[in-house]
Image (cartoon, coloured by chain):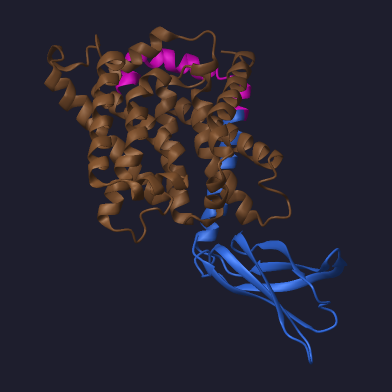
Amino acid sequence: MNRDRRTGATRTTKTEQRVPWLEWLAAGLGLILVLGLFGMIGWQVFNGATTPPAITVEVEDMAPVEGGYRVLFRARNGAGEAAAQVEIEGKVSGPGTENETSRVVLDYIPGRSIRRGGLFFTRDPRAGVLTVRATGFAEP
Amino acid sequence: MTSERYAIGLARAFGGAILFGIPLLMTMEMWSLGFSMGRGRLLLLMSFTFAVLVGLSYFSGFEKTFSLKEDAMDAFAAFGVGVITSAVLLMVFAVISLDMTWGEIVGRVALQSVPASTGAMLGRKQLGAEQDMEAEAERKREAGYGGELFLMLAGALFLAFNMAPTEEMVLIAFQMTPWHGLALGALSIVLLHAFVYSIGFSGQESRPEGGSFLSTFVHFTLVGYAIALLMSLYVLWTFGRTDGVALAEIANMLVVLGFPASLGAATARLVV
């Protein structure tokens, strides 16, 4: 290389001896971080990072709040690809009464991740049958 | 060079990582891109960034380097600083938390480490009090034309990368008529030339044949704009902004992103 010719061999070896321990430490740590990151991202490439989203919703908690009832849920994306604008719909149905539907949109659910949210109802969901599911998503 | 001196350089690197990284660390789109963008593209982006870091280390690292090995060590150190800075700040901003999956955390940190590690590499130059200006100028001289183009590339990449994640780039492209596009392209070239002529290359030996208007224009301005457009295309593709988009619409986006990218290419010499 151009530079090697200019600096000369003696100068190069001299500076190599003077590399401080902190530089070795910083460069070594950096190398480990680089390899670690590359490894983890590379692993995802070959382990289903490209399967389209599959979202399941679980109800975590139901409680009366001011003005109605609150249902907390967690939506889990079991596949590798992220989903955007995931619409979650909850429906309370019971014998002899009208169904009540509430909706919420979650901005993102990354691959194999969980996002939490809540729905409000005016009727007690514990009195009827509550179903909560994801109705759709968009690709990010 | 002692460990003490190196520690000062390292502290400046952290300063640079924070300073240059903060705009994107606080950009919402970057958080979701971290887990939603293609893993292959993320890997490629990080490899490319690393190569650019090695090159930047040659021109202005946080210490004076003498061999490719030292440039690589500098690049690794800058990368480490970028990763640590990104991880800590994202955690403080509550963008990443330990109850997330590691895939999400890694994706977010990895993407943010790109601007942060570039900032770490430039930190010494920007925040350093004493530095070997002569050695640096000599390097730029002896690197010649290829070196100039590399600095342009690094500058274009950095600025394009800073703008491309935002929704606004696409929105502006959608809003523009073809006339707006042509005007913006022309403005980019004029500004690029003005910068190149006034700050970059005048009085350098690398300026071809005494630097007539035409030769400077062809050798630096046009090539610089081409580099800016290429970097814009690369960054847009990396973020998946070009997937399934018509060619004409991509051209519009390129002109939009090419504007900051060409400014980055023109001013890289000031920063590096």
Figure quadrant of the C terminus of chain B: top left
Q: Position of residue A138 (x, y in %)?
A: 51, 66
Locate the N terminus of chain B and report the quarter of the image it occupies: top right
Taking depth in this image into account, of A33 and B70 the one nearest to the observer is A33
Does residue B154 belong to the magenta stretch? no
> Does the image show residue B224?
no
Residue, far bottom: A96
Residue drawn at the location 57% of the way across and 46% of the way down: B28
**Residue B95 visible from this viewpoint:** yes
Q: Nearer the viewer, residue B46 or A67?
A: A67
Total numbered labels placed on residues in the image: 0
Closer-to-camera residue (A16/A91): A91
Residue B91 falls left or right of residue B241: right
Residue B145's place in the image compared with A14, above or below, is below
Measured as percent of width and height from the top left, residue A45 is found at 50, 60
Colour of chain A, in one word, is blue
Nearest the eye: A31 or A71: A71
Q: Position of residue B38 (x, y in %)?
A: 47, 56
B53 over A135 or under it: above or below: above
Q: Which residue: 26% across, 27% down?
A: B146
Residue interval drawn in magenta: A1-25
Chain for colour brown: B
**Residue at the location (54% across, 38% down)?**
B24
